[in-house]
Image (tube, helix red, strand yellow):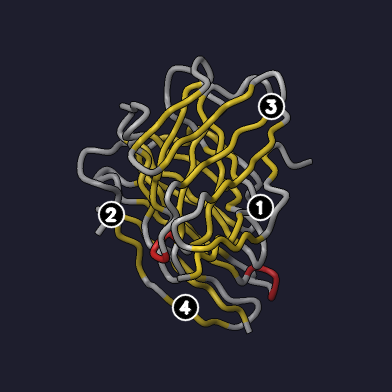
């Protein structure tokens, strides 16, 4: 049973527009949520995270929104750039107070067209 | 360079064989995690070590084992390999501190294992 789900395998967006990537989770005990970006032939790189006690975290062009009642989070990229084209993984951390193993979704491939 | 080093980058081997994947964590990080990414799958957690001790276990097959050495590098041993073990294997390390802008959990670039 998948605890972290990314239901859209791919997303295509025009350069300069907003990209919205979605993620749903089932375990209400998750205390941290993260987004990772992955280019081909590279490991995932950390993008942004949010604690379960917050509902929004912003870092430059990237904003993560958390809706705990809906068990849903989303990543907004504004404006989108061609260099943002990558696979984006949503992940959740189960262990409160310290880092534990992350539970990942299957990823969404974002293509930003010039 | 993330600071987490994985070797080798690519490995091709036959079914039934045994291989060892190596990971050197980022300087100062005590925790090492191993993940498997199969085709069209997310990253599946295999096992975590903290300062030489096994801390958590995920969906790791009995044919797989791992260890963390006193210098904190880790090895993932895969034996009696099957075609379905072909995947990307990632190592990550963490140091225990995190904020919203720096989770402190860093991945290596992975080892691509192909079993033929």
Chain holding disc 1: B
Tell me how far mark 2 sits from mark 1, CA to CA: 30 Å
Camera-side residue of B77 and A7: A7
Residue B78: percent from the left, percent from the top? 55, 63
Q: Which label sits in the foreground, 2 or 1? A: 2
Q: Is residue B38 above or below residue B54?
A: below
Chain holding disc 2: B
Tell me how far mark 4 sits from mark 2, CA to CA: 21 Å
Q: Which residue is mark 4?
A: B11
Q: In the orientation shown, which residue stands out farthest toward the top?
A: A53
Q: Which residue is mark 2?
A: B2
Q: Is residue A110 above or below residue A94?
A: below
| Label 1 close to label 3 by CB (< 8 Å) | no
> In the image, is A26 to the left or to the right of A58?
right
Q: Which residue is mark 1?
A: B62
Q: Which label sits in the foreground, 1 or 3? A: 3
Task: Give the residue drawn at x 41%, y 56%.
Answer: B75
Q: Is label 2 in a helix, a strand or a loop?
A: loop
Tell me how far mark 1 sits from mark 3, CA to CA: 34 Å
Residue B17 appears in the rendering: yes
Assess disc 2: are there few (<14), some (14-19) or many (≥20) residues with their C-alpha within 10 Å of its C-alpha: some
Residue A43: percent from the left, percent from the top? 42, 59
> In the image, is B99 to the left or to the right of B57?
left
Instruction: Tell me which label, 2 or 1, sits earlier in the chain.
Output: 2
Q: Which label sits in the foreground, 1 or 4? A: 4
Residue B21 appears in the rendering: no
> In the image, is A93 to the left or to the right of A23?
left
Q: Using the rendered image, report if marks 2 and 3 lie on a common chain.
A: no
Instruction: Tell me which label, 4 or 2, sits earlier in the chain.
Output: 2
Task: Give the residue drawn at x 35%, y 36%.
Answer: A59
Chain holding disc 3: A
Chain holding disc 4: B
């Amino acid at each position: 049973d998948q605890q972290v789900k990314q239901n859209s395998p791919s997303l295509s967006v025009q350069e300069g527009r907003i990209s919205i990537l979605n993620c749903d989770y089932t375990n209400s005990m998750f205390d941290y949520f993260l987004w990772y970006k992955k280019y081909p032939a590279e490991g995932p790189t950390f993008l942004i995270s949010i604690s379960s006690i917050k509902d929004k975290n912003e870092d430059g062009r990237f904003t993560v929104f958390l809706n705990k009642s809906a068990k849903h989070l989303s990543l907004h990229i504004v404006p989108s750039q061609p260099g943002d084209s990558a696979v984006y993984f949503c992940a959740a951390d189960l262990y409160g107070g310290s880092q534990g193993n992350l539970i990942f979704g299957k990823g969404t491939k974002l293509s930003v067209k010039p | 360079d993330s600071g987490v080093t994985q070797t080798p980058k690519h490995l091709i081997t036959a079914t039934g064989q045994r291989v060892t994947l190596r990971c050197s964590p980022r300087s100062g990080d005590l925790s090492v995690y191993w993940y498997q990414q199969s085709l069209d799958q997310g990253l599946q957690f295999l096992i975590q070590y903290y300062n030489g001790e096994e801390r958590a276990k995920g969906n790791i097959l009995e044919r797989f084992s791992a260890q963390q050495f006193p210098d904190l590098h880790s090895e993932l041993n895969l034996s009696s390999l099957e075609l379905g073990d072909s995947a990307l294997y990632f190592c990550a390390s963490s140091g225990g501190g995190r904020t919203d802008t720096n989770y402190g959990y860093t991945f290596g670039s992975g080892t691509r294992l192909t079993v033929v």
